Amino acid sequence: MAATPAADPAAEPAHPDIDRPDVDRLEVDRPHVDRLELVEVLAALGHPVRLEIVRRLASGSEAFCGEVVPDLPRSSVTHHLKTLYESGVITRRPAGRRLYLALRRDDLELRFPGLLALVLG
């Protein structure tokens, strides 16, 4: 019989919202505000297409993917949205066949005060 491995104390702590049924699974997977890295956020914002997506989301409301993504090939759109999501700049919420996006304005302001104001002008 194999021994059960001991819990790794260096492992990432459980997300506080993991057991809440009203929290979408994709939202739980995003980087927690304490884990946002400036280098990753700046790299994500450093591409003109991704910066344009963020500008379109800057109004603060959630938007359908087709409303904010420039007319690009699907593979390019997927790459840019993945980069923004994995860096922690945006959230995404699927609803049927649609994908809704939102800027993590409050989280970014909390972690990097003034960054969005500088980047968005």
Image: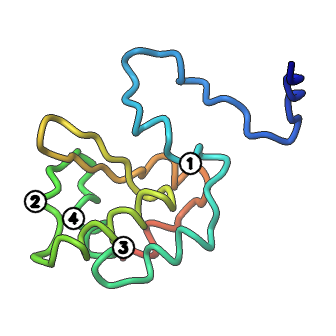
What's the residue at 66%, 51% (across, down)? Answer: 35
Above or below: residue 119 compared with residue 37: below
Sequence-earlier tag: 2 or 3: 2
Above or below: residue 3 compared with residue 41: above
> Which mark is on residue 56?
4
Sequence-earlier tag: 1 or 2: 1
- Whole-number angstrom distance, CA of label 4 to CA of label 3: 10 Å
- Whole-number angstrom distance, CA of label 4 to CA of label 2: 8 Å
> Which mark is on residue 67?
2
Q: Nearer the viewer, residue 16 or 4?
A: 4
Disc 1 to disc 2: CB gap under 8 Å? no
Which mark is nearer the camera, 4 or 3? 4
Sequence-earlier tag: 1 or 3: 1
- Whole-number angstrom distance, CA of label 1 to CA of label 4: 22 Å
Disc 1 to disc 4: CB gap under 8 Å? no
- Circle 4 — which element? helix
Where is residue 27? Give x, y as percent. Answer: 42, 38
Q: Nearer the viewer, residue 7 or 2?
A: 2
Q: Amino acid at mark 3?
A: Leu
What's the residue at 61%, 54% (across, down)? Answer: 111
Residue, disc 3: 120
Q: Nearer the viewer, residue 41 or 60?
A: 41
Q: Amino acid at mark 4?
A: Arg
Mark 3 crowd level (few <14, some 14–19, many ≥20, 10 Å Cα): few
> Which mark is on residue 31?
1
Which mark is nearer the camera, 1 or 4? 1
